[in-house]
Amino acid sequence: MTDTPERKALRHRLTTRLWHWINALCLLVLLMSGLTIFNAHPRLYWGEYGANGDYAWAAVGSSQTLGYVRLGETKVETTGFIGNWRDSEGEIQTWAFPGWATIPSYYSLADGRRWHFFFAWIFSIGLAFFMIRSLFNRHVQNDLHINRSEWRPSHILRDIKNHLRLRFHDDGGVNIYNILQKLSYIGVIFILLPLMIFTGLAMSPAMDANWPWLTDIFGGRQSARSVHFIGMFLLVLFFIVHMITLLLAGPFKQTWAMITGGERKESGHE
Amino acid sequence: MNNLLTRRKLITASAIGAGSLLSGCDSLSRSPAFQNILGSAENANFLVQRALGDRLELASEYSIKDLSPKFRANGTRDPGTADYTASAAQGFADWQLRLTGLFGKPQNFSLAALLSMPQRTQITRHDCVEGWSAIGQWTGVPLKLLLDLAQLQDKAKFLVFHCADRLGGRPYYESIDLLDAFHPQTIMAHRLNGEAVPIENGAPLRLRVERQLGYKHAKYVTGIEAVATLDNIGSGKGGYWEDVANYEWYAGI
């Protein structure tokens, strides 16, 4: 409740805000154009090779009457959503992901690839720039660094309990992020997002010649493709949790803060 | 009240936003100017991927135990023309590979002539633009040998591969630049997994250009044309899929 006028530090730096929104746009386009690319061959394999005759650990099945997702031996019917859905004209389509989830909304692998690679460049340059800038302006050291007391299991447990009670705190104003936030932001920015770039590159035949170790790290091109897809899934999961916590913590104030910078000191709940 | 208005506006705006995002992306996809902007990523991919490695870096090679149980066929599975079917019936004994264009000594090679030349065998991974991969063992004549015999001229910048198959009424063709043409793994393959290349995989001759995606690996090759520019071939984009559907000429990713 107490607003200290002398402490007007911004909650989010300009670099953070700029990157946040550019990155959000990139990830949305990458997700949707990626689903277009996936629709060209909606099957996932482990190892170096994998084509229609080989065993897929995950696959989308389609027919004029039925759509389903198969994971291992488990089939889940998804008619109306995946594998069998109606387009805006009411026609049944049997591509894996529906038009509203893909860019472009009609099936074009070539166009999907163009969108994907163009935004992949913006995404990668943006991420690299943000990482370097955040080290130099000490965003990482000051806001994301996890100190020894935060690693204590009792501290983590308390934070989990607080989250479960839907109490989101900023650690008394010293840290702008609590331990769970720090862990998820570090995990996404420094692990998951780079993983998407590297698994993407590992699928490239030219990169396989340039950097054969890259494909090997992931256990083969088809494994890299599977990890790329799983990474996408985890990013969507992060987005959902991000949205839920945003809604619970005050969506307008928080969104406004990510646009204008906000104020570093929390003034409690409206 | 103020808050409520903002909220309502925000919800309406995001609903409109989500709808227009999709149709917006579609109209952008159909705009030539925007396609050019998106397509600029191809140049970046090309420059960076070529710069990252030794320019003659080899694609990974595998061992017999890594072979795909079945090498998937895609695209044309049988050209089906009268000429092709007649040639297939006699084991392609009359097949000719015609080297035309900017060569000092343009010439034809029969299949028998190609078989009598030095061969290269490689087990490589074929990566389709759709996302699947298959590992196969290919045997063929290094393209470099043919280019040297026919004396490729300095003016030549690209090689165009003309094919016996047609898709949607248009002849299939592909093209590569000279860096890929002289690459040691670039071969005119006539054997797959120790046997004559099956018809569905491009019999009797198929280009292998291992650092690029599958659609660059022209099947049923009847001719190699050396050119200074791709402008006058097909619709000028350097390949069948490039012409008809915006696929990138550089298919390294």
Image (cartoon, coloured by chain):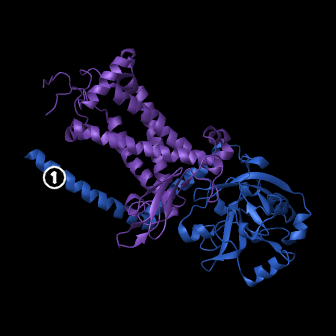
| Residue located farthest toward the bottom when viewing the structure as drawn | B82
Where does residue A9 sit, x and y in percent of width and height? Answer: 24, 26
For this rendering, which residue is in front, B6 or A6? B6
In-image side of A252 versus B31 (left or right):
left
- Closer to us: B71 or A261: B71
Q: Which chain is purple?
A: A
| Residue farthest toward the top in the current orientation of the protein | A149
x, y percent for residue B223? 77, 72
Compared with A21, A66 (above or below) is below
Question: Would residue A176 be seen by someone viewing this image from the given angle?
Answer: no
Residue bearing mark 1: B8
Q: Which chain is blue?
A: B
- Residue A15 vertical placement versus A171 (above, below): below
Q: Amino acid at mark 1?
A: Arg
Residue in the image at 71% along x and 43% along y: B54
Res A242 → quadrant:
top left
> Closer to the camera, A143 or B89?
B89
Q: Position of residue A58 (x, y in %)?
A: 53, 52
